[in-house]
Image (cartoon, grey):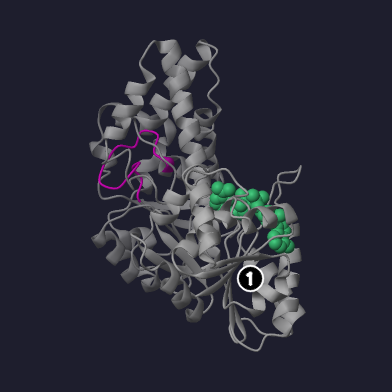
Amino acid sequence: MKISIFGLGYVGAVSLACLGRDGHEVTGVDIDQNKLSLISSGKSPIVEAGIVDLMGDVVASGRIHVTDNAEEAIASTQLSFVCVGTPSQPNGSQSLDALIRLSEQIGDALKTKDRHHTIVVRSTVQPGTVENTVIPIIEKHSGNSAREDFSVCFQPEFLREGSSIADYDNPPMTVVGVQDERAGELLRDVFGDLPCKFIQTDMRTAETLKYACNTFHALKIGFANEIGRICQVLGSDSNRVMELLCEDKQLNISTTYLRPGFAFGGSCLPKDLRALLYFAKSHDVDLPVLAGLLPSNQIHVDHAAEMILERGERSIGVIGLSFKSGTDDLRESPLVELVERLIGKGMNLKIYDPEVRVSQLIGANKRYIEEIVPHIGSLMCESVEEAMQGSNTVVVGLQGRDIAAAIYENSKADQFFLDLVGVAQPEKLKGEYRGICW
Ligand SMILES: NC(=O)c1ccc[n+]([C@@H]2O[C@H](COP(=O)([O-])OP(=O)(O)OC[C@H]3O[C@@H](n4cnc5c(N)ncnc54)[C@H](O)[C@@H]3O)[C@@H](O)[C@H]2O)c1
């Protein structure tokens, strides 16, 4: 395939060398003459394992060509990768200067091209940038229409500096956010043989995914380092602790707890987090990542309350009360807290949870409910139907096929459903539907 790459920094130079190695004819474009001279003489503009030999070989093969002329590059290729930088500005926002300038150049170049062209944005960009900035600029400058005359898609780049050639050949996945099938098919031709899943999705999901991945990586490092600092004062072996933590592939290194939903609660997580933070504080160890978890959780409960209260409806049916489906444990249940908040605001509540029989509660669970919402017993219903009857708003806080079926069946067109758990078939609900964070 004839491919052009705009921006020959860390991402662009590696892509240029690897695509050339794989037999494509590649035109590299940069505004930095120094980089162009280095590549045309078979040298690498970046330091990266294996790149020196690879660049030398592919340049010698004659499949690589470099230029500072965008028009020439667009005219002689069918597919362009955009790898220009999107650096931070002093206020934390992202500079799109290079991307905007390049989109103008691509648009100008497409004005004189009569064949279809596909542009793949690989720079990390704020979600919405491709549809709201890149495409309108190219359309304006070319006088052409996206999807018809040219395609633009977004493909997040997952390679890591230092091992980027190995990562290019063995990525965790290939994800392409597309507006039209054509771009997806073309990228499948280029990357479909890599030993990973090829996943096509919408543009905004692909753009957001890149941020979610990088933020998750940063979170993992911050977490491991904070556990390390607390281990240091405890005299525990931090390496061994984290090694064993990673041994657990069921709860720790797994998809468990990685789905957007409602706040955490229960008798362990908040209590143990508080204890660890207290211990750290008493040893003058700052753990801001871990210290942010309880406030973050609280904000999530506040968010649910606001989504209900902003509607101004007073009758609310709550399905679920315990801290998670399948238990009667009410201690530190975020649903109990939500209920308490709504009662405090004068709402009329009806609650149903098949596991919670207030008259049968015992021990710590009983004491907890007596202290937090002592009059809760009078709000409890015997069925989903009863809790939903006459409620303007229904809060779905319980999972389970039977519960979901009863909620679908009893739903009414004038009801609002706030889903905290991710019901399987929201389209079966007759009223208005919103997820807590989707
Ligand atoms: N570095 C990484 O490991 C990595 C990994 C994944 C994603 N990304 C993302 O990829 C993008 C590129 O990152 P990078 O580290 O390769 O950047 P970089 O700064 O190393 O390279 C960007 C290149 O673009 C060139 N450029 C600027 N304007 C241009 C124009 N109009 N035409 C042609 N070239 C132009 C610059 O001269 C520079 O050589 C960023 O959005 C980054 O966030 C980087």
Q: Is residue 303 left or right of residue 7?
A: left
Q: Is residue 25 above or below residue 181?
A: above
Q: Is residue 324 left or right of residue 60?
A: left
Percent across and percent down for residue 205 are 51, 63
- Judging depth in this view, the residue of 419 and 367 nearest the camera is 419
Q: Quadrant of residue 173?
A: bottom left
Q: Is residue 80 left or right of residue 410?
A: right
Q: Main secondary structure of the magenta part?
A: loop
Label 1: state its secondary structure. helix
Q: Which residue is mark 1?
A: 131
The structure residue drawn at horizontal position 44% and vertical position 70%, both measured from the top left corner, is: 190
Q: Quadrant of ligand 1?
A: bottom right
Percent across and percent down for residue 14 are 53, 54
Percent across and percent down for residue 176 are 48, 67
Q: Which residues are magenta?
A: 320-334
Inspect this view and state whether residue 337 appears: yes
Inspect this view and state whether residue 8 appears: no
Q: Is residue 364 above or below residue 151?
A: above
Furthest residue toward bottom:
114
Q: Is 228 one of the magenta-colored residues?
A: no
The structure residue drawn at horizontal position 41% and vertical position 17%, both measured from the top left corner, is: 231
User: Would you call the spot at circle 1 few (<14 residues within 10 Å), some (14-19), or many (20 or more)?
Assistant: some
The structure residue drawn at horizontal position 72% and vertical position 85%, both measured from the top left corner, is: 112
